[in-house]
Image: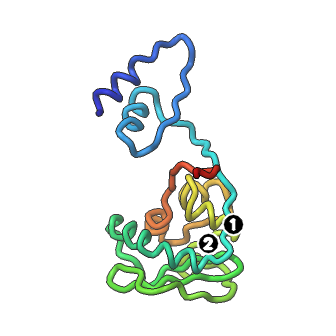
Amino acid sequence: MVAAADALARSVDEPEPVTVWDRPGTVGGAVVDEVCGPAPAEAEQYYVRVPDAAALLDRMRPVLDARLARSGIEPPDEVLLGTFRQQLRLPVVDGRFVREPVVGGTLQSPGAHGGAGAAPDLLGPLLLGPLGMAGLSRRHPDVYPGPHVDLMEALFPPVRADLLTYYLP
């Protein structure tokens, strides 16, 4: 597979500049990055509304558990995410998110309490978008990882996927 991707990437003749769109994390993507340079930093985004952040995070607990386990980071007793309208506390026991998020009211400066923050309209892109915590926090001052940067970037990485925008019978 690597040889095929390498041959394809090297077979492109210049005089004309070539734009390559790849899927990061794939064999082909790694070869294209090596031969052609990294992909552009711009990312396409879709607007995603999250009507119930606690319910979405609860459904995402298995995914968050897996990300936490892969990270090797020792988490605090709870992970705090403030969304300006509310605070969401995800209890952690033995390195796992053991139950649904505990929802609280508004909380000034979640970073001062060991948590992260994201404006309500940026929660969808944080959880499901191609920029993750690291990319969103560089672009939006209303998204910040707080004091546990590595943990928040591990829990909320860039998510790259095709979005099905039409119905298949």
Q: Is residue 145 visible?
A: yes
Q: CA distance from mark 1 to mark 2?
A: 17 Å
Question: Which residue type carries mark 2?
Answer: Gly
Question: Mark 1 Cα within 10 Å, few/some/many (few <14, many 20+)?
Answer: few
Q: Disc 1 marks which residue?
A: 49
Secondary structure at numbered mark 2 = strand
Q: Position of residue 97 (x, y in %)?
A: 42, 81
Query: Residue sitting at 35 percent across and 75 percent down?
Result: 74
Q: Position of residue 130 (x, y in %)?
A: 56, 52
Q: 25 and 35: which one is in front?
A: 25
Question: Which residue type carries mark 1?
Answer: Arg
Q: Disc 2 marks which residue?
A: 117
Q: Residue furthest top?
A: 15
Q: Quadrant of the N terminus?
A: top left
Secondary structure at numbered mark 1 = loop
Whichever of callouts 1 and 2 sits on the residue coming sooner in the sequence is 1
Q: Is residue 117 above or below residue 93?
A: above
Q: Residue furthest front?
A: 169
Q: 166 and 31: which one is in front?
A: 166
